[in-house]
Structures are given as structure tokens and as C-alpha cells.
Image (tube, rainbow, N blue to C red):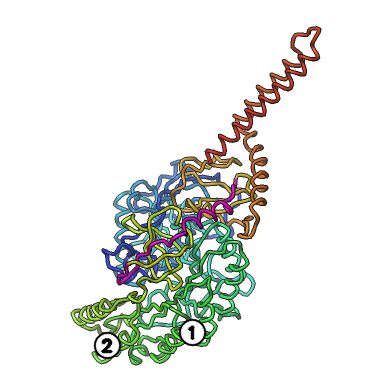
Amino acid sequence: MADIEDIEELTLPSDDPTSAANRKSVHQVAVRSFTRRSATNHSSAPAEPQPEPIVGSGAGSRDSCTPFLPGTATVWVKTWGCGHNNSDGEYMAGMLAAQGYRIVLEDSKRGEADLWLLNSCTVKGPSEQTFVNEINRGKDSGKKVVVAGCVPQGNPSGAAWEGLSVIGVQQIDRVVEVVEETLKGGSVRLLKEKKDETSKRKAGGAKLDLPKVRKNPYIEIIPINTGCLNQCTYCKTKHARGDLGSYAPEEIVERVKTVLSEGVMEIWLTSEDTGAYGRDIGTDIVELLWGIVDAMEEHPNQTAMLRVGMTNPPYILEHLPEVAKVLSHPRVYSFLHVPVQSGSDKVLDDMRRLYTVHDFRQVCHILRERVPDVTIATDIICGFPTESEQDWQQTMDLLREYNFSVLHISQFYPRPGTPAARMTRIRTDIVKARSREATAYFNSYPNYGDKLGSIRKVLATELSADGVHFVSHDKSYAQILVPNDPRLMGRSFEVRITQVGKFYMIGQVCEGEYERLEQEDAELQKLDSSGRVAIVNKKKTPKLVRMTRKMVRLDPGRSGEDYGDEQADDSAIDGAELSLGSQSTEVPTQSEPLQDVESRRSLLRSSGSLAVLATPMGVGYWSLVSLAGLWVVFGPSSVQRQVRWSVRTVGILACAWTGWEMLLAMKRQKR
């Protein structure tokens, strides 16, 4: 499977500017080291006893006499697969960056790295083979390699990662110790399942408040549970993620509040099955969704949107009326991914999907009836071993009935260790023919013809591959390309649809929207130099990180020891965002009067003066002023000494204050 970031991208052709292969993140540059190693290590409190490192002698192992300095290496983090896997990769990158390691995300910079951290996907054979090829490339290049994700978790004894360090899907919070042991020449394998400390049940995974490097600073992926309740015969992910383990709703809601304060504009809930959430801890997905919506409504960030992740039909059916209400809420995208896999009850039974085609139709019917302009995404598998021609035609009938605007068409791939892998396969030419038939039908009808000329409210969060457009989404999560104008990134505004295609629309910003956005900037933009107020600069990519109790900007050109308590320059604003799981920061509401904004700015300037005073420039300046004061007191005397003393004092103080204000102005302008 290709390296994909979201289900909506799965059906996009390679020549489409919004496809996963062509889409570029808003900012994908290296996040350089920026902080001293802290005595408190997020990964130092494991849920299981500390294992003894397994020291290997694989290729490229370090000699025991070679000195090792933690936090000085460069690590390339590569992730394949679903939203959950991408979230895991962002957490691992964040924990390493927080300990001083330089993180690179771009494939083109892998050669600069001392260690490769490869986070794998096991859904299909091709995705696993890509992962194995990357392991071999790293070994051949003399790189240290650490493997993670679903492939080694589901098959710990795989030959390709024999002797390498392995991080299990529920052990990502211990990535720092694994990387450091690997850099020293050893190898560590951490694959155990996490348990809740009180109930001893399976936990959702690593804590959600860990440091995180977001590939896109405007999008936060929050896993709400791991594993599922199904036993699908073709699924290898079950071997890796296991049975259902849900996060506590309080932990999820707190994470939502935190990332909203950090300037995130889209929150994606992800898991192997969101509909099953909470069944292991006495709650359900509806209670969680309303809790999140309430938190978003109460937060000053009033333009962020929520997207609900994939759910299987069996566990969403009983909640459909309430889920429909949630999806109709203005702060929630009217979008739901519900895989059907086949239009034949016989094939669904052989797959052990635990629902019928009628159940799936019921989901589609209720959502389309109760949620205006809803988008239902679905998946089908072509060529399951027991699928007859009649079964396949039932699948095609289902596609013709609903004309899904988002459809993932996949050929069957036997995964080792699954029951379906032992079944007799259908001839490859038949499987490909069915895949082509489904693709041809999907491409035969328009998705957005009725939207031409309409006015849509959109939120822009990404950059298209051609660099000409930003990618935005409307309430139904349809992709709308808008002008590449920095004033629009991370903002919500209205557009008129001027062109429609199969996979996206093109919108023209409505008259008066630029003026409205500029007015919002003037009223809401805050300084953050004192650490008391930290609000996203909507015209630029936010890169606020918490160090001690202050919010500072991450400058890729400086090391962590250069920061201290000083506010970093704002000159370097590119790059993935690092979130250290900061507490809620003070953000003004849209109803706050402009005079209150100005009073806060005055407070920030006065607090900023103390920060400048602590710099060498400030110390030198006031040393000169003090010398001038000594000259006033102890200078030559005369008959008119009192008069001259008064004149000198006033003059020196006036000059000193004027010069000080000029220095502060220069400092603020740099920010």
C-alpha cells in the first residue's frame, strides 16, 4: 500500500494535485534540536518492568569503547499507513526532538541521518515489502535501523529485522531509550501490551500528552482506542493491534483542549474502529463525541473542526441517530468512513465481518436522510477467495445504488498467518478485471456537478503539490482548491465554486473575505514573548513549544542550549510543529474588546523588557548608564554645581530611556 495519510486520498490518481502521492505538507523541513536533555524523561516511566537490553552484533554495531553522547544524533522518521500509525510516528519524533535529537522527515534527507526509524504498515503485502526494502537500504548504507509499527509487532520473528531494535505499537513512549541503545551498538525489542494500572485491562497505548512533531501543524491526529472487536479472516492488523483498548474519555478531551490552544485547526479521531470505542471501559463513542464537541464549543478557538474516523457497521448501528446529530453539528465534518468490503452476504460471512449488506444500507440510509450533504466513504475488496461472479455483481449493484464520492478499491492480498491466506485464490486476471470494472464505474459519474456556482464555507490546512493552491475542505469534507495566499492558511472563509472535477473543486474567495480576515488579525493577534499569552499567528505556521512554563518559537537554526528563557527569533517559521503537550494557554475570545487587547500588549511589552534586560545587550547598555550616573555625582564641582547636577541628571535619564525604548523596538521588530 502506498504511503497514505488519509482515506479520502486513496482513490485519487497520481496526476491529481490533491493526491496523497503528490500532496505536500504545508511545512516539511527538519526540526532541529532545541532543548537540553531534561532530567524528566517522558519515556522513563514504563508500564512494565525495565527489560534488559538485548545487545546484538548486527551490521554497523558500535564498538563498546566509542563514546556516545545522547541527543546529538540525527534521526530520519518514516511512517507508512493509516492515521493511527501516523500519529504514532509523530509522537516518536516528538519525544526524540524533545531530548535534543535532530529529526528529519523528508525522504530526500535520509542520507543525513545517523539512524533510521521505520514505522511500518501491515495491511497489504506491497506496503510490507516497501518497509523491508527500506530496512535493507539502511543496512547497506551503514545506518543504524530501528523498526516499529504493525509489521514487526504482528510478526516478531521476521528475518528482515532479525538483530534490529523493535518498538511495539504500545511501547512508542520508550523510543528514546531504544534509539539510544541502538546508537550505542545494542538492540532492544519492546513488544509487550500495556495494561491499565488500576483495572489491569488492556490500555489504549502511550499517554496522549507526550511530545509530538506534527507533519502538518494545523492537523492533530488523536487515537481514541487501539485494536478492535472483530476477527476478520483477511486482516493482519489484528495480529499487531490486538483486542480493543480504549483511552479514557477525560484524557482524550484534555488532549483536544491542549491542541486547540496550540493552534490546531483540524482534529482527526482515529482508531481501528471508532464505533467500538468505550465498550471495554463502560462508555461509548456518542458520549465521547459530545464531550469533545462541548470542549470545542467552550474553547476560544472557534473555527477548528472535528473529523470522525473509520467505523465498522456492527458497532455504529445502535448509535446512528446520535451520530447523525453529531455529524450535523457545525464544528464537525459531515463525513464518515464506513467500509463495506463486499456487497454479498455470503462473502461478508466468509470474511467474518459480523454484519450484512442490509446493515450497511441502513447506515447509509439514516446518514443520508438525517445529515445534510453527508459524505460516506467506503472500501471494497476485489477478488476475495470465495467471491463468485454473482457475488461480485452484487458488489457492483451496491456501488451503482449509492455512487459513493469516496471509494477505496483494493485487490485481495493474502496476509501470512490469516485464515484467508489458506484459502484457494482466484486467478489474478479475474481479480484485476474486477478491480478495473469497479474503477471504471467509479470514474463514470461526477461527484460535484451540483456544487458549481455555490457558496461554500471552507477551512484551508494543506498545500497542493503544484504549489499553486491551498487545499481546503467544506462541511462535507469535500476538497476545494483555493489560491495560495498566506492570509488563507489555517483560516475559515467563504468561496464560490468556479470549477468542479472528479476529486476536487476549485473555489474563488468571496468578496469581502480578505478584509474580514485582516480585521480578525488586527483584533485577535497577540504577542507571546512573556509566555503568558500564546496564540497562533494565523498568517504564519505556528511553531510554539513549551519550555519550562513558557511558550517560545522553535528556530531550526539554533540548538537547545541557545534558548534558555529567551524568546526565539520568528525568522524561521518553516517546518513541522513540535508540541510538548503544553497546558492550555490564554487565548482571547472573539468578543474581547480591542482596548483589552491593547492593555495586554502593554503588559507583554513590560514583561518583555525584563527578558531583554537579562541579555548581554541589556546588561551592557545599563552599565554605560550607571557610569554616566557616577560621573554626575562625583564629577568636577563648581559654584553652580547644584544646577549642573540637576541638568545632567535629567538629560542622562531622558537619553537613557529613549535609547532603551529604541532597543526594545528593535527587539520586537525582529519578532
What's the mark number on residue 392?
2
**N-term mark: 1 or 2:** 1
Q: Quadrant of residue 302?
A: bottom right
Q: Quadrant of residue 593?
A: bottom right
Label 2: element kind: helix
| Three-letter amino acid code at the position of disc 1 | Arg
Quadrant containing the N terminus in the rendered view: bottom left
Q: What residue is shown at x 39% (from left), y 47% (from top)?
A: 114
Q: Relative to the observer, which residue lies in front, 192 or 424?
A: 424
| Cα–Cα span, label 1 and label 2 | 30 Å
Q: Relative to the observer, which residue lies in front, 448 or 101?
A: 448
The magenta span reads 499-528
Q: In the displayed structure, does residue 654 sit left or right of residue 251?
A: right
Q: What residue is shown at x 68% (from left), y 47% (from top)?
A: 599
| Three-letter amino acid code at the position of disc 2 | Trp
Q: What residue is shown at x 61% (from left), y 65% (from top)?
A: 254
Q: What residue is shown at x 34% (from left), y 74% (from top)?
A: 448
Callout in the foreground (1, 2): 1
**Percent coordinates x, y for residue 181 in the rendering:** 47, 52
**Are there few (<14), some (14-19), or many (20+) residues within 10 Å of tag 1?**
some
Q: Is residue 236 visible?
A: yes
Q: Marks 1 and 2: CB-CB under 8 Å?
A: no
Label 1: element kind: helix
Q: Is residue 167 visible?
A: no
Magenta run includes residue 38: no
Disc 1 designates what residue? 370
Q: Relative to the observer, which residue lies in front, 250 or 27?
A: 27
**Percent coordinates x, y for residue 333 in the rendering:** 48, 72
Please, which residue is most extreme toward the left here? 429
